[in-house]
Amino acid sequence: MISGLIRRVVVVGGTHGNELTGVYLIKKLEQFPELLHRSSFEATTLLANPEAVVLNRRYVDRDLNRCFADEDLANPALMSYEDRRAKAIAAQLKPENQPNVDVIIDLHSTTANMGLTILPSSKQPFNLRLAAHLSALDPAVRVCCGVQCNQDTPMLRSLAPFGCTLEVGAIAQGILEAHYFQQTERLIHAILDYLEAMNQGIPLPVSSHITLYQAIASVDYPRNAAGELQAMIHPQLQFKDYEPLHPGEPMFLTFTGETLPYQGESTVFPVFINEAAYYEKAIAMVLTEKQNITLTNK
Amino acid sequence: MISGLIRRVVVVGGTHGNELTGVYLIKKLEQFPELLHRSSFEATTLLANPEAVVLNRRYVDRDLNRCFADEDLANPALMSYEDRRAKAIAAQLKPENQPNVDVIIDLHSTTANMGLTILPSSKQPFNLRLAAHLSALDPAVRVCCGVQCNQDTPMLRSLAPFGCTLEVGAIAQGILEAHYFQQTERLIHAILDYLEAMNQGIPLPVSSHITLYQAIASVDYPRNAAGELQAMIHPQLQFKDYEPLHPGEPMFLTFTGETLPYQGESTVFPVFINEAAYYEKAIAMVLTEKQNITLTNK
């Protein structure tokens, strides 16, 4: 267990301005702040990238969720809109000589078919136990750790030691889907209730094991020398996030109809398959290993 | 039948820069122009909004597919990027004192679950017969006419007397889906083959009836006085394009969980349900009537 109690929790939406589930959940929580109220800690909201929300774009100048590396936050030469937002958010959530935020819940959506995914801020036992609790409450919840699953990532969630990103989908950018809106809202409340019970010394049950999808590599689309796409996600792989992909199975389909197989040597479980925002990041999908983790009480 | 033969056909993609199915089909057809070749007419490609394609956005300054009203094309004061593109495209497809383009096939995608939809350029018998042929070839093809279904619309397709828009989906903006890529490609070739056979005096069979979904109204999202959304598409209606919506059935779900029913007096068949690009156009869905049309040979 952590040494101190949870005192400050921030629910963040609109880190990407065209992921409307989080944007509108923040608007709702701002309108009805009593929904966040728990007796043992302060929970507030943050609309992280309001200018991108107005423009209905992921970002204005650069991806805000890659702006939180310590060296970037300390670099006065970085003055894009998102760099300035990152510095302002860091000052707000992690002020010097004042209590920092303990838990960040960052609300995202994806065009990949990732259902309800928890991406813990790090593999600290606290975060894994929270994820285990959520996936026990709803077996549809999956837990995924990125290649960088630690406090040193440039993501917004790295500003607090505890918490997670919620990724829900498949949802197109720029739209609301009521089903995922409601499911994300339920997850927020499940997290707040879990923290409240822990603070009150009557922690909610957590299973001793968790299935974790650990990212091991990303795969780019086949491209020509000029960097132009030469293939699409294979129709047999589209929407098959978290399903096993065996060596030799179809991965891409070229524009001329040729199937390109997965050429790895071990079975993997792809996620973020065909995420719209990752075309520019040279990521067609992220390959994960399925791990069974035994949780400790620490 | 039309009086003259079809001489010029243009396949258009990227009218909206983030609808990648059309963008990449145009790239493929540019790379393999022999795929377009038919003996009796010239078929070419047009990437309509290249700057929006580069930006991966629907448009730069304004929706190109609303820039083709005659008075706008003639108005020298309209000088946004898309207004200039519209004038250049009109000069190319509809040159003065030269043969104009006869058929435009404009490739689009939608976040609504519209499957394979043909939107004829007008209700001229030529266009309806082409649509009937396509829907007979593949019963999954549906035929839909907008509220403005005539040559006077401000859409790009209005530059030619014949042709259609293809709308495929549900596809998120900014991604390719191989399944819809291939199906759209098949539709393009089916249209070219139909035109070729007609030009050669051996027209392909056309059924004498067609089911047409005729738009009668659009419905905006519930909004507050400031114009902010107050509700989402109801989960029971999401992805139910072309299915009957009866009076009293759920239409929207407010952020606080209240169901708002469809308050019309007759059964309708909504389309473009939750299209991302229509949030800014104040369109949550377009209501259609299902009509059975008898086709003439004229």
Image: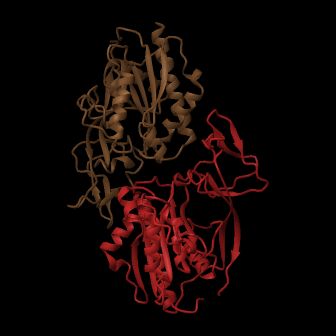
Chain colours: A brown, B red
Residue B127, above or below A137: below
Residue at x 24% of width, y 36% of height: A77
Position of residue A67 in the picture relative to residue A139 (left or right): left
Where is residue B87 drawn, in percent x and y?
Answer: 46, 73
Where is residue B35 drawn, in percent x and y?
Answer: 36, 77
Position of residue B55 in the picture relative to residue B106 (left or right): left
Toward which corner of the image does residue B134 lie, by quadrant? bottom right
Residue B113, above or below B206: above
Where is residue A293 drawn, in percent x and y?
Answer: 32, 24
Does the image show residue B137?
Answer: no
Count up the numbered dots: 0
Position of residue B26 in the picture relative to residue A177 (left or right): left
Quadrant of the snapshot with the N terminus of chain B:
bottom right
Towards the viewer: B19 or B177: B19
Toward which corner of the image does residue A177 lie, by quadrant? top right
Which residue is outermost to the top? A201
